[in-house]
Image (cartoon, grey):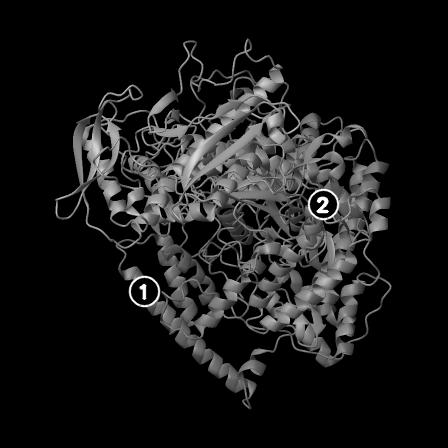
C-alpha cells in the first residue's frame, strides 16, 4: 500500500502572465480534488480512516463499490417472490434514502453471556423436544413485518472492516478499472511541471545546461540600455529597443549582443535575459565573434546570438510565447527533373539550429505531403503559447500567426497558410490531408524550438521520425507515439505480458526518475489493456502523448490514457474487432493496410503473416523475432512463468534443502516435459485451433486454446492452462519433491483449484459422483426434488462420504503441508512404488483402517479458546428457531447428546457434537469470513446467524417437495436459488475434500446471511432473503468456483464431468500390497496433523495484470501474494488437546495455481518457527507472530528420532516437559507484564488469563499454546 502523499504548495502565478503557454503547461497542475468535500458512503457517513503501517492516516484510496451488499428495500420491489401466506405484502412508503442494514457486533459473546470458564456450569439433563417444551406463538404475518424490525441498533463503536486495497484492484471493472486506479494513485499528488520538466522546458534547459556545465573562461558583466534605432527604408519595425550589452571586466570596452523590442519586454525582463546570456558567454568555448559584435555599425545580433537569446528568454520568461518558424505551402511542380514529394502539393518548414558539438550553424528542412497520413488521421494543434513567424534576414518578424478565437464559441485555432479554394482547386480529402501536413510541420517546428536550437542532425531526424510514427501511415519501424516526447526520452514503456494476456503501459524511466525526485512516493500506476494485440494499444499511447504535448500536465495525460484504455477494454469485452481489423478480399489485400499485432506498424494486408508463436498476424520482422523467443510458443511461455513461481515457493518451503542449482536444473527438466505436452501442429490445425496457443488437458484429454484478450469481468478465466503436481510428493535422488519432471501435468486452472492437494482418485470420484447425480436428476425429470429422487440421492451421497473418508486417510499418509511432504524420510524406490499404490488405486491397506476411526474425532481447534461457551440463556430461543426451520422444510437433522442439530452428512458426525462445539465452529467461521472473505465490506453477521444459515441451507437441500404443501412454491424457489453447482455432500473434518465452506453467492459483493442479529422467527430470515450472498458448499466446489464469473458455472461443471484420469495416475484395479509393522507405523495417521497451513489474516487478491511484470521476463524470485502481512498465530499445538472437540481450520485459497492460502503462507510459518529456536523464552514481543511448535508425524522423523542421541524415550519426555514448562512460564510472565499496563480488562479477557494459568500449572502445553494464540491476537 502506498503511503499517503504529502501535498505540495501551489504555484503562484506571475504578475504578468503574458500569453498562454504553448503545448505545455509549465505551471504545476492544481489538485482538482483539493477543495472537494470528503468522500462519503451511500448513507452519508464519511469513510473512516484506513490503517496503514500501524498508524492512522486519512484514506486516499477509497473503493468506489458499495460498502455492503445488503441494500434497503425499495417501493418498486419486494423481497419475496412468493409469500409465506396468501396475503400480499403491501408496498411500504419510504421517505428519503433507505438506510442499509444495522451494523452488528462481532463479539463472540452475545449480550448477557458469561465467557468466564471458571463459572460453574449447570448439569446437563436430557431435554424434551424444543418445539414441545416451548409454546409456539403464531407466526408473524408478513404484512405486519417492518423492514427494519429485524435490525437491532448498535453503539457507535462498531467500525466497518475494510481493506486498504480498493475493490477496483481486485474485481475488474471494464467501465472504470484504469480510471479508478489512476484516480486513486494520483490523488494528493502535487507535480510542479516546471520541475517535472516538460518537453519544451527540458529541451531549453538541456541546451543551456550543456553550456553552463562548461568551465568559466571570461568575466563579462550584463548591461541593458534603451536604444532608438536609425530609421532606414528597409527597417521599419520595432525602432525602440533594449540593447543587450556585454561589458568587459575593465569596463573600458563593451560588446553588443542583440536587441529586444521595448513594446514586448520590460526593462526587468530584458535584464533577466541579458544576465542569462552573459552566463553562457563567459563559458563559450568557441569563437566569441559568433556571439558578440563591436558597437560600431551594429544593426542586429548574429545568428548564434539571436538563437541563444531566444533560449534564454524561454528559460527566464516561461510565460512568454515561444516564437517558432512558420511552415510554408509549396505547390506541386512539373518537369522531368522534378521528383519525390515536389511533384505534389506539400508543406515544408526550415528550422535554424546550432550543432551542440561543433557549434556551427545549420538549417534543418522537413517536407511532408498528404500521402503520409491515413484517411482518419487528425493531428492536434499546438497550444496558445506558440507563435509562428517568418523572420527577415536581420532577425525581425515579417509575418506572424497566433491562435485565434472564433466568434461562434468553437475552439481556437491557427489560421492556415494554405490558399483558399478560389486559388487552389483540390479535392476535400486532399485539402484535409494538407491541413494535417501543415499541423505536423507546426508540431515539428515547436518541438525543435523548445530544444533551444542546440540540436544535431540525428536528433532532428529522431524527432521527425517520432512524429511520423505517431501520426503517419508510412511507418517502416516499430512505432511509438511517445518516443522522444519527454525531453528527448521516451514518455512511455509498452510491454506485452504474455503470461497475463494483456499489455502494460507504464511511465518511461526518465519520467519515473523525475517523479521520484519530486517525492519518493510518487509513481504512476500501470495502465492495462486486456489484449496482446498492439492495435488496441496504439490509441491509448496516442491519447497520453497528445495530452502531454498539448497540455504539459503528466497527471492529466495519464488520466486521458486511462479513459482511452477503459474504452478499449469495453470494446474488447463486447468482442468488437480491433482498429483496422482485416476483412479483406483477395483484391483488397493488395492495397489495404492493417496494424501489425505485435509492433503496431501499418502494413499492407498481404505482407502480414500468421506467427507460429501465438497465431497472430504480424509483420515478417516481428514473426522472426517471436519465433526466436527461447520457449517457441506462448503456451509454453505462459506455463513456464507459473512453473518458476511454483519452484520458488517450493524452494522456500524446503528451508534450504532445495539449492539454487537443483532448482535451476529441475526447472529445465520440467520445461522439456511441458514442451512435450503441447500437441503437434497437425493436430492443432485439424482441430481448427490457433498454433502456439493450444494445449491438452491431461485429466480430460480435451484440447483448449488461449485467447489473445480477456473478456471476463473477473481477474482470470477457468480454462487457462495450469501446472498441477499429480501426487502429493515424488521420490527423487535428492529427496521428496512436489514439482519435478515425473510429477507434473497440464490441466485446467479451475480443475487444479478444485483438486487442491488431493490425490487424482478423489477428482475421479468427484467426476463419478457428479455424473451419477446428473443421471439421477435426468431420470426423475421434472420431479427432481421428489421423494424418489431424494432416496436415490441419499444413497449416492452415502457412497461418496465413505469414498472420501477412505481417500482422506490415503492422502494423509504423505503428510498435508508442503514442508512435511518435502522432508519425509527417504525410502527405496521399490518402497516408494509400494507407498504410491494406494494413491493410484484409491484402495486402502487393511493395516491402516484403524486410522479412519480417528478422522472425525480430532480434538483440536485452530484458535478458538476454551473461554468461548454457548450462551445458555439464549438456548431456548435458538432451539425453537432451529426446530421451526426443520418443521418448515419437513427435515429432521441428526442431533448430538444435548440436542444440537448436525447439519453435515450423518455418516460424518463426530462422537462429540454438542452446542458448545457448534458455537465454537461458528466462531471460527465468522472470524474467517470477517478477516478474509468479507474483508472489503462490513460484517453484519454473528456466530448465531452463521450456524442458523448453515442449518437453513442444508434443510433446503434436504427438503422433499410435495405439491400439496402450502409452502410448495416458496420451497421450490428456495431450492432453485440455493442449489449448489456440484451438490456434493458435506463433512466437518478438516483435510477432506468435502469439508463444508462458506462461499460467495456472487463475487464482488459482501457476504451476509440475511438473518437479523438476534432472530426469533424464520419469517425474519425469509424477509431478508434478497440480501443473502452466502452459499454453504463443499470446499472442492468453493475452490472450483474461485472468483470466476457466474456465466462460467456450466462450463465448470462440464470440466468436472469430463475428467478421465490417465491409467498411470488412477487405476482402481491396482491392489496395494500388505504393510509390514514398521511400514504401518510410518504411514498410519495418529490423529494429529500438526504444522498445518495457517489461517491467513488477509488474502491479497492483487490485480495480476496491473503491477506484476510478465513472469517470463521476471528474473528475480517471485514473492508470495501477501508479503509483509502476518497471519494470525494459529499453528497447531504439539499435542492433542484432550478437552477440545474436532479440528476445524481454514478452507481459504488464494487461487495461485491450485495452492492453498496456507501453502502460500507456509514459508512465513516455517521461517518464524526457525526464528523461535534462537529467541529467549520470555521474549513475547519477538515471538508475537510465531507458529506453535512443529511436531513431525507420518513420514517425518519422530521427536525421539530428532532430539535424542542414545537417550531413552523416558529421558526425552522429561526433557521435553522441562523445556515446555520453562517456555510456558516465560510466555506467561511476558503476558502479565503487558496486561499490567492496561487500565481495564473485560471479563472475557480475565477468563482467558485464568485459563492460561490453569493450563500452565497442569502442564497442558497444547491447551496453553492454543489459549496463548487468542491472547496474542487480542493484545495485538
Q: What element carries label 1?
A: helix
Image side of residue 1078 versus residue 144, left or right: right
Choose top left, top right, bottom left or bottom right for residue 334. top right
Choose top left, top right, bottom left or bottom right for residue 992. bottom right
Instruction: Give x and y (percent) for residue 907.
Output: 71, 54
Q: What element carries label 2?
A: helix
| Closer to us: 17 or 747 | 17
Image side of residue 330 versus residue 395, left or right: right
Residue at 48% in and 18% down: 416
Q: Looking at the picture, does residue 978 appear above or below residue 261?
A: below
Instruction: Give x and y (percent) for residue 1245.
Output: 37, 56
**Which one is in front in this view, the residue at disc 1 or the one at disc 2?**
2
Judging by the rendered image, the residue that carries numbered circle 1 is 1232
Choose top left, top right, bottom left or bottom right for residue 657. bottom right
Image side of residue 686 versus residue 277, left or right: right
- The numbered mark, 1 or 2, whose residue comes first in the sequence reads 2
Q: Can residue 291 be seen in this view?
A: yes
Residue at 15% in and 48% down: 249
Quarter placement of the C terminus = bottom left
Q: Looking at the picture, does residue 91 appear above or below residue 376?
A: above
Judging by the rendered image, the residue that carries numbered circle 2 is 620
| Closer to us: 650 or 563 | 563
Please tell me how many numbered marks the rendered image carries. 2
| Closer to us: 604 or 698 | 604
Q: How crowded is mark 1: few (under 14 residues within 10 Å), some or many (20 or more)?
A: few
Q: Is residue 173 visible?
A: no
Instruction: Give x and y (percent) for residue 205.
Output: 34, 43
| Closer to us: 1185 or 533 | 533
Separation of residues labelled 1 and 2 (CA atoms): 74 Å
Amino acid at each position: 500500500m502506498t503511503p499517503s502523499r504529502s501535498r505540495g504548495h501551489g504555484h503562484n502565478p506571475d504578475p504578468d502572465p503574458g500569453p498562454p503557454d504553448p503545448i505545455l503547461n509549465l505551471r504545476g497542475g492544481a489538485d482538482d480534488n483539493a477543495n472537494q468535500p470528503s468522500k462519503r458512503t451511500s448513507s452519508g457517513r464519511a469513510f473512516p480512516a484506513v490503517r496503514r503501517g500501524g498508524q492512522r492516516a486519512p484514506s486516499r484510496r477509497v473503493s468506489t463499490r458499495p460498502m455492503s451488499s445488503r441494500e434497503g428495500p425499495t417501493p418498486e420491489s419486494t423481497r419475496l417472490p412468493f409469500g409465506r401466506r396468501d396475503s400480499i405484502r403491501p408496498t411500504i412508503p419510504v421517505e428519503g434514502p433507505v438506510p442499509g442494514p444495522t451494523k452488528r457486533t462481532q463479539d463472540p459473546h452475545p449480550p448477557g453471556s458469561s465467557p468466564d470458564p471458571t463459572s460453574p456450569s449447570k448439569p446437563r439433563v436430557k431435554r424434551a423436544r424444543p418445539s414441545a417444551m416451548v409454546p409456539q406463538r403464531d407466526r408473524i404475518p408478513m404484512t405486519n413485518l417492518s423492514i427494519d424490525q429485524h435490525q437491532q441498533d448498535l453503539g457507535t463503536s462498531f467500525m466497518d472492516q475494510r481493506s486498504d486495497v480498493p475493490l477496483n484492484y481486485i474485481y475488474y471493472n471494464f467501465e472504470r478499472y484504469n480510471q479508478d486506479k489512476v484516480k486513486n494513485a494520483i490523488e494528493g499528488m502535487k507535480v510542479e511541471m516546471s520541475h517535472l520538466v516538460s518537453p519544451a522546458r527540458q529541451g531549453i534547459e538541456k541546451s543551456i545546461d550543456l553550456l553552463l556545465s562548461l568551465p568559466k573562461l571570461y568575466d563579462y558583466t550584463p548591461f541593458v540600455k534603451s536604444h532608438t534605432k536609425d530609421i532606414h527604408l528597409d527597417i521599419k519595425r520595432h525602432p525602440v529597443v533594449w540593447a543587450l550589452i556585454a561589458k568587459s571586466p575593465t569596463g573600458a570596452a563593451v560588446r553588443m549582443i542583440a536587441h529586444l523590442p521595448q513594446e514586448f519586454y520590460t526593462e526587468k525582463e530584458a535584464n533577466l535575459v541579458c544576465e542569462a546570456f552573459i552566463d553562457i558567454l563567459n563559458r563559450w568555448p568557441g569563437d566569441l565573434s559568433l556571439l558578440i559584435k563591436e558597437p560600431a555599425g551594429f544593426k542586429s545580433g548574429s545568428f548564434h546570438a539571436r538563437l541563444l537569446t531566444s533560449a534564454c528568454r524561454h528559460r527566464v520568461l516561461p510565460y512568454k510565447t515561444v516564437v517558432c518558424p512558420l511552415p510554408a505551402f509549396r505547390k506541386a511542380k512539373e518537369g522531368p527533373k522534378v521528383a519525390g514529394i515536389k511533384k505534389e502539393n506539400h508543406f515544408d518548414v526550415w528550422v535554424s539550429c546550432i550543432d551542440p558539438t561543433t557549434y556551427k550553424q545549420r538549417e534543418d528542412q522537413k517536407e511532408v505531403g498528404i500521402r503520409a497520413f491515413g484517411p482518419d488521421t487528425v493531428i492536434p494543434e499546438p497550444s496558445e503559447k506558440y507563435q509562428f513567424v517568418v523572420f527577415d534576414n536581420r532577425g525581425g518578424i515579417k509575418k506572424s500567426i497566433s491562435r485565434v478565437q472564433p466568434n461562434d464559441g468553437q475552439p481556437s485555432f491557427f489560421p492556415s497558410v494554405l490558399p483558399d479554394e478560389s486559388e487552389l482547386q483540390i479535392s476535400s480529402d486532399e485539402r484535409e490531408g494538407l491541413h494535417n501536413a501543415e499541423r505536423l510541420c507546426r508540431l515539428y517546428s515547436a518541438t525543435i524550438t523548445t530544444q533551444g536550437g542546440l540540436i544535431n542532425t540525428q536528433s532532428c531526424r529522431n524527432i521527425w521520425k517520432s512524429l511520423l510514427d505517431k501520426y503517419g501511415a508510412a511507418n517502416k519501424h516499430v512505432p511509438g507515439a511517445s518516443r522522444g516526447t519527454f525531453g528527448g526520452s521516451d514518455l512511455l514503456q509498452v510491454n506485452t505480458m504474455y503470461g497475463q494476456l494483456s499489455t502494460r503501459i507504464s511511465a518511461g524511466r526518465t519520467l519515473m526518475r523525475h517523479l521520484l525526485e519530486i517525492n519518493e512516493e510518487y509513481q504512476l500506476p500501470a495502465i492495462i489493456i486486456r489484449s496482446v494485440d498492439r492495435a488496441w494499444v496504439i490509441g491509448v499511447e496516442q491519447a497520453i502523448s497528445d495530452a502531454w504535448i498539448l497540455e504539459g500536465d503528466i497527471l492529466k495525460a495519464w488520466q486521458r490514457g486511462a479513459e482511452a484504455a477503459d474504452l478499449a477494454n469495453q470494446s474488447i469485452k463486447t468482442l468488437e474487432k480491433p482498429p483496422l481489423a482485416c476483412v479483406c478480399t483477395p483484391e483488397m489485400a493488395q492495397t489495404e493496410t492493417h496494424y501489425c499485432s505485435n509492433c503496431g506498424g501499418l502494413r499492407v494486408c498481404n505482407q502480414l503473416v500468421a506467427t507460429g508463436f501465438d497465431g497472430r498476424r504480424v509483420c515478417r520482422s516481428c514473426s522472426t523475432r517471436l519465433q526466436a523467443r527461447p520457449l517457441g510458443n506462448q503456451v509454453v511461455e505462459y506455463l513456464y512463468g507459473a512453473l518458476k513461481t511454483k519452484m520458488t515457493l517450493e524452494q522456500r518451503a524446503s528451508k534450504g534443502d532445495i539449492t539454487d542449482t537443483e532448482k535451476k536444473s529441475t526447472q529445465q527438466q520440467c520445461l522439456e516435459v511441458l514442451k512435450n505436452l503441447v500437441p503437434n501442429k497437425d493436430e492443432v490445425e485439424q482441430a481448427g485451433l490457433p498454433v502456439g496457443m493450444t494445449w491438452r488437458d491431461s485429466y480430460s484429454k480435451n484440447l483448449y486454446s488461449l485467447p489473445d484478450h480477456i473478456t471476463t469481468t473477473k481477474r482470470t478465466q477457468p480454462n487457462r492452462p495450469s501446472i498441477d503436481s499429480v501426487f502429493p510428493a515424488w521420490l527423487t535422488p535428492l529427496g521428496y519433491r512436489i514439482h519435478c519432471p515425473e510429477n507434473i501435468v497440464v490441466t485446467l486452472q479451475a480443475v487444479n483449484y478444485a483438486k487442491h492437494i488431493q490425490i487424482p482418485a478423489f477428482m475421479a470420484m468427484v467426476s463419478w459422483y457428479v455424473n451419477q447425480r446428473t443421471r439421477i436428476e435426468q431420470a426423475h425429470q421434472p420431479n427432481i426434488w421428489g421423494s424418489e429422487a431424494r432416496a436415490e440421492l441419499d444413497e449416492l451421497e452415502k457412497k461418496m462420504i465413505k469414498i472420501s473418508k477412505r481417500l482422506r486417510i490415503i492422502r494423509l499418509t504423505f503428510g498435508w503441508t508442503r514442508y512435511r511432504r518435502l522432508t519425509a524420510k527417504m525410502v527405496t524406490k521399490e518402497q516408494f512404488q509400494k507407498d504410491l499404490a494406494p494413491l493410484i488405486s484409491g484402495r486402502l491397506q487393511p493395516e491402516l483402517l484403524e486410522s479412519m476411526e480417528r478422522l472425525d474425532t480430532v480434538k483440536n481447534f485452530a484458535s478458538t479458546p476454551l473461554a468461548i461457551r454457548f450462551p445458555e440463556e439464549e438456548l431456548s430461543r435458538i432451539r425453537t428457531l432451529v426446530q421451526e426451520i426443520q418443521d418448515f422444510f419437513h427435515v429432521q437433522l441428526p442431533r448430538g447428546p444435548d440436542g444440537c442439530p448436525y447439519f453435515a452428512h450423518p455418516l460424518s458426525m463426530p462422537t462429540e457434537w454438542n452446542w458448545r462445539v457448534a458455537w465454537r465452529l461458528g466462531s471460527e467461521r465468522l472470524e474467517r469470513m470477517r478477516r478474509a472473505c468479507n474483508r472489503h465490506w462490513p460484517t453484519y453477521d454473528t456466530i448465531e446467524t452463521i450456524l442458523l444459515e448453515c442449518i437453513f441451507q442444508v434443510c433446503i437441500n434436504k427438503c422433499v417437495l410435495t405439491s400439496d404443501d402450502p409452502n410448495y412454491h416458496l420451497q421450490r424457489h428456495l431450492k432453485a436459488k440455493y442449489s449448489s453447482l456440484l451438490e456434493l455432500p458435506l463433512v466437518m473434518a478438516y483435510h477432506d475434500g468435502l469439508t463444508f465452506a462458506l462461499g460467495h453467492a456472487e463475487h464482488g459483493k459482501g457476504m451476509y446471511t440475511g438473518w437479523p442479529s438476534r432472530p426469533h422467527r424464520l419469517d425474519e430470515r425469509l424477509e431478508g432473503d434478497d440480501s443473502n450472498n452466502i452459499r454453504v458448499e463443499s470446499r472442492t466446489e468453493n475452490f472450483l468456483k474461485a472468483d470466476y464469473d457466474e456465466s462460467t458455472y456450466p462450463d465448470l461443471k462440464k470440466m468436472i464431468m469430463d475428467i478421465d484420469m490417465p491409467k498411470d495416475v488412477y487405476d482402481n484395479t491396482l491392489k496395494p500390497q500388505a504393510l509390514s509393522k514398521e511400514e504401518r507405523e510410518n504411514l498410519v495417521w495418529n490423529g494429529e496433523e500438526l504444522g498445518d497451513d495457517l489461517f491467513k489474516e488477509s488474502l491479497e487478491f492483487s490485480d495480476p495484470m496491473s503491477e506484476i511484470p510478465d513472469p517470463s521476463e521476471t528474473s528475480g524470485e517471485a514473492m508470495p501474494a501477501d508479503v509483509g502481512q502476518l497471519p494470525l498465530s494459529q499453528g497447531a499445538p504439539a499435542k492433542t488437546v484432550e478437552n477440545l472437540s474436532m479440528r476445524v481450520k481454514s478452507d481459504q485459497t488464494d487461487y495461485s495455481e491450485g495452492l492453498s492460502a496456507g501453502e502460500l503462507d507456509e514459508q512465513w510459518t516455517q521461517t518464524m518457527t526457525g526464528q523461535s529456536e534462537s529467541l529467549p523464552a520470555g521474549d513475547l514481543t519477538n515471538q508475537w507472530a510465531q507458529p506453535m511448535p512443529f511436531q513431525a508425524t507420518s513420514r517425518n522423523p519422530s521427536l525421539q528420532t530428532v532430539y535424542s542421541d542414545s537417550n531413552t524415550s523416558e529421558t526425552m519426555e522429561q526433557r521435553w516437559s522441562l523445556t515446555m514448562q520453562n517456555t510456558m512460564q516465560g510466555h506467561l510472565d511476558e503476558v502479565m507484564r503487558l496486561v499490567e499496563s492496561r487500565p481495564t480488562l473485560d471479563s472475557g479477557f480475565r477468563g482467558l488469563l485464568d485459563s492460561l494459568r490453569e493450563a500452565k500449572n497442569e502442564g497442558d502445553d497444547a491447551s496453553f499454546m492454543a489459549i496463548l494464540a487468542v491472547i496474542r491476537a487480542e493484545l495485538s
